[in-house]
Image (spheres, rainbow, N blue to C red):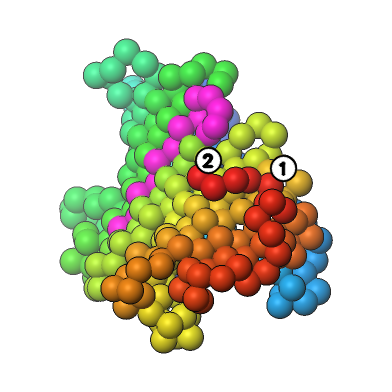
Amino acid sequence: MKRRWLTGLAITAAFGGCGGNYSNEDVDFQLAMPERDELTVKLPNQALIIDPTLSSEYYLLTRKVTVTFNGIVDAFLGLIDAVRSYPPTERKPGMRIWGPFPNEGHRDWLLRVVIARRSDVKLASFEYSVEFRRRADPSAPWAAIIDGTYSLVGGALGGTGVMNYRTAAARAAGYPLGDDLKEIDSITIDYDRLGHPSKVNLFLTSHPSNEKLTYQYTEETDGSGTLLFTFPTTPDEVAKGVAEVSVRSRWIGSGAGRADVTVTKGTILMKGGARGVDCWGTDTRKTYVFRSWEGGDVLFGYESACVFGPP
């Protein structure tokens, strides 16, 4: 899940012909679209891992999941950043429209971005959508592939929002999703930047398997954070009876952290003993390892070396 996702959405270069000037109200509409810093997981930068065998297994998994999570966010926000770079093409009362523009990779399709101020609520609240239709059928209705809402309920502190990516309409219309996007049925990202900890949740449903993955992230002002996620394991772990795990990974601002692991799928559940713990230091090296499915023994170190106790 990397930036090649944008092959299904890319219109950035097409914005070059917009021109014009911003109004103060234009900026209000643009602020309704989330920024990268509001949605990404911020795992602290740490020393280069010279030998991964010395690093905590679940630190490495947390880092891998963080890259995936942030890659999903980047795929959407690359388009949104393009919207921020240019004034709207069309201004209407309570609404701004960017486009339509051709999809760079599939120029027989058009895309546009619509942001509307909600009039049914007292708070500053907006709805937005990224919409598509065939260039050859100008009478066809626009269909959304991304939609979302944003409410500025905290003044300078921030607001709350929801962003949805749904592929059903695109599949029905024959819109080109790109190889990676074909594997996704829907993604929902909701976020709350009103106070601390700030929160971001991401819910993904795959296609056609309908497998569901959930990521929940909280962030404190001191750089500490928590990431909860489920993850399918390796074939070696499946052979041990551990097919899927739920992980609660926590870290402090220096990067040292702890992951508490619960087996959620696998034959080990029939035998009892489905809990694991990994702790690591600022250099990512393991300081404590416990696996109940490995005989219930401590595999490395002492739990007193962990920067967090049990949840």
Going 50% across and 53% down the picture, which residue do you hit? 248
What is the span of residues highlighted in magenta in the rendered image? 186-198
The circle drawn on residue 228 is none
Q: Position of residue 192 (x, y in %)?
A: 46, 32
Q: Position of residue 208 (x, y in %)?
A: 24, 73
Q: Which residue is mark 1?
A: 253
Check if residue 196 falls in the magenta segment: yes
Query: With 283 as the anchor, is 257 left or right in this view?
Result: left
The residue nearer to you, when weighing 205 against 173, is: 205
Magenta-drawn stretch contains 133: no
Identify which residue, 250 or 309, lies in the foreground.
309
Image quadrant where residue 66 sits: bottom right
Q: Residue at x 56, y 71 (%)?
A: 297
Q: Is residue 188 visible?
A: yes
Q: Is residue 71 above or below residue 195?
A: below
Residue 218's tag is 2
Q: Secondary structure at mark 1?
A: loop
Relative placement, left or right, of 103 versus 46 is: left
Amino acid type, callout 2 = Thr
